[in-house]
Amino acid sequence: MRKARLRVVVLAAAVALAVTSCSTGSSASSGGGGDGKTLPGNASSKDLREHAVSSLEGKKAAFVPVGMGTPLTEEWNRQLKRGFEAVGMEYVTRDPNWDTGRQAEAVQSLINEKPAVLVVHNFDVQVLAKLIQQAESKGIYVIQINMVSNYKSDAFVGADTIDLGRRIATDIVTACGKDTQTSHEVQIVQGDATSGFTLDVMAGGKEVFDKHPEIKIVSTQAANWDRTKAHDITATVIQQHPNLCASWGFWDQMQYGAATAIKEAGKINQVKVFTSDHSAITCEAVRDGLFFESYGYSVSTQGTDIVAIAKQLLQSGKAPGSSRISDFTPLVKVDHTNWNQPNMCYDGKNDGLTVS
Amino acid sequence: MSVVLTKLRPGGLNRLSQEQIVLLVVVALFVVFGVLLDGFLATDNLLNLVRSVSSLGILGVAMAVVVIARGMDLSLIASMGVATAVAIQLMQTDVSTPVALLVGLGVVLVMGLLNGFLIAFVEIPALFATLASGLLIYGLARTTFLDGLIAELPGDRGFVRWLGQGTLAGVPVPILLFLAVAVLAQLMLTRTRAGRFIYAHGDNAGAAALTGIPVRPFTTIEYMVSATIGFVGGLVVAGSVGGFNTQVIDGSLIYDVLLVVVVGGISLVGGRGSVLSVVVGTALIGVMLNGMTILNMNTHEQDIVKGLILLAALVLDNRLHPRDEETVRQGD
């Protein structure tokens, strides 16, 4: 009964949102989110400044990653903290330390605290889907980063994971396809099997491999982003398929373990190791010949992009849940030709960018 | 109840210990995989099979020492993880490898001392004392000393890398370390007075105290020895993948360790089993993991198999060591 009533309320809210978002198309109309104001074109500089300051200052932004302490999440955190605090916003993080239950709890408690902006890094496609919806209906702008949920929120900032899968698969076909004197055997080391990242990269890869039936995927195993698991799985696979041509893992931190296993088996010159992300370990591994290539997704700018989108949302006068922006950050291939270029890799401690 | 179960027990099984039954299962799986899976019996695959579970085996031996003494160390992964990560983080500075390792050793010894003190002198049940101390040390380390989730081992620290990736006469070093730890622990448990005390303590702590064994200080030493063995396991993990991810502390590794210990026949009521039980349990997990990877089973299919094996082991434990008045009472 209560559920039914809740559903009616949510539906009514959704209708209201749809109506307001339709009416905010013109210049000076009032919207539902932020403080509901937008400026006319002839507003003075002072008005412009005051509108920005009043939309942002004193508001709260919260970040819930899958887990802090990796170069990836630390780099985001640094950029978010700097960006939000620079405009006078309060910035908080909640660290679920790779526990899905704790992540859901953290988001739930933040919904009650009602920050203006919530940045989430989804563990998988399902766990936060309902909560993101709930947050938006409570008037919180939700921005997802790098791993998307089944429920799409105000904005997504991250790699174009489908294209990422396509590009790496294409490079694998170049290295191991029918024009090469190789076994055409490829190993895939997934992250978490139900992560949005894994699913999209797999989908992109499949598109390419379907057109190249000579490529034999000899193993597809989930190492759950864990280096030791990737190592142990790969150690077995390389024994079983000694002529393996390529090993493709979905995150540099994890795939480093697979590369180590291949090196231990004495096959690092034969097996080409593909991965994505560009933390410091990627540049080291490319330098040491452990990685053949990795696709970075401009992690150092993702944090600043999120801040920019949050500022835009807060000043737009649009209601939370009425936009569906996606900001796919540029993909950059890191290989032996360019790993030593400045800022090619980031370490999560110092600036990948020269922004102060 | 136990009378009924005794009647139900098949005569043949009755004469075999759990250790021997599991060994038979391992051999059976081995034969099945050997026949069905190409390349399973290749020397390289077998070495790789043992190599991939050797750190689990070392942790199993560590756990066995306290479980045989009717204890339990849920902080084992936390203390080994924190000590390993601390040592590696020191190696990122100018600190020499031996000093960094000594600091790591210091961490596990303090942790063992704390656990032993809480259990033996404050008389908190081992389960709760170690659950709390594990959370405490991980939380403290992450907030004060450790830089992040993953401690990257610098490329020039050859010794630790060798522990995980090296070979001696063609045999991977982790396997040799597992063997060395297992043999030393077995000798300690069976050939020394300390080992006899551990069994006596596990069998009946009260009686052990009456016969003059200093049970309380002894408990402390057991936890210190266990944590030290755990540290060796941590170094193997770190060496083999060039870094240590402290995420494992929050993960399910502790249950895998307990699985290895219990499956092999070290009873949680103490005083039973030996290091051989751990070796057999580890071999079972190793053969299973290896076979399942070769079969390219997905995570959920693997979970089904692991769950079934654990259930089978618990049923077996229940039938071979039925609960009775003697074993359920704490401290008898």
Image (cartoon, coloured by chain):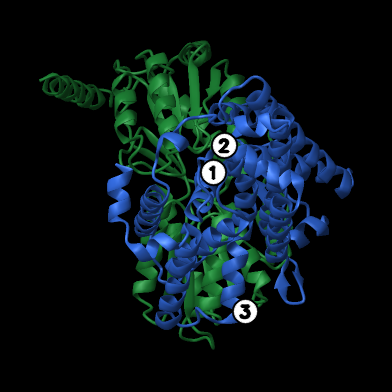
Task: Report the mark closest to the observer, 3 or 1.
Answer: 1
**Residues beneath discs 2 and 3 located on the same chain:** no
Front-most of A354 and A51?
A354
Give the color of chain B as drawn: blue
| Chain ID of residue with mark 3 | A
Q: State the green chain.
A: A
- Residue type of the residue flagged with mark 2: Leu
User: Which residue bears the numbered disc 3?
Assistant: A270
**Residues beneath discs 1 and 2 located on the same chain:** yes
User: Which residue bears the numbered disc 1?
Assistant: B254
Query: Looking at the image, do the residues carrying marks 1 and 2 touch, with CB atoms under 8 Å apart?
Result: yes
**How far across and how far down the image is residue A55, in percent?**
46, 15
Pick out the residue farthest to the front: B211
Circle 1 SS class: helix
User: Are there few (<14), some (14-19), or many (20+) residues within 10 Å of tag 2?
Assistant: many
Question: Closer to the N terminus: mark 1 or mark 2?
Answer: 2
User: Which residue bears the numbered disc 2?
Assistant: B74
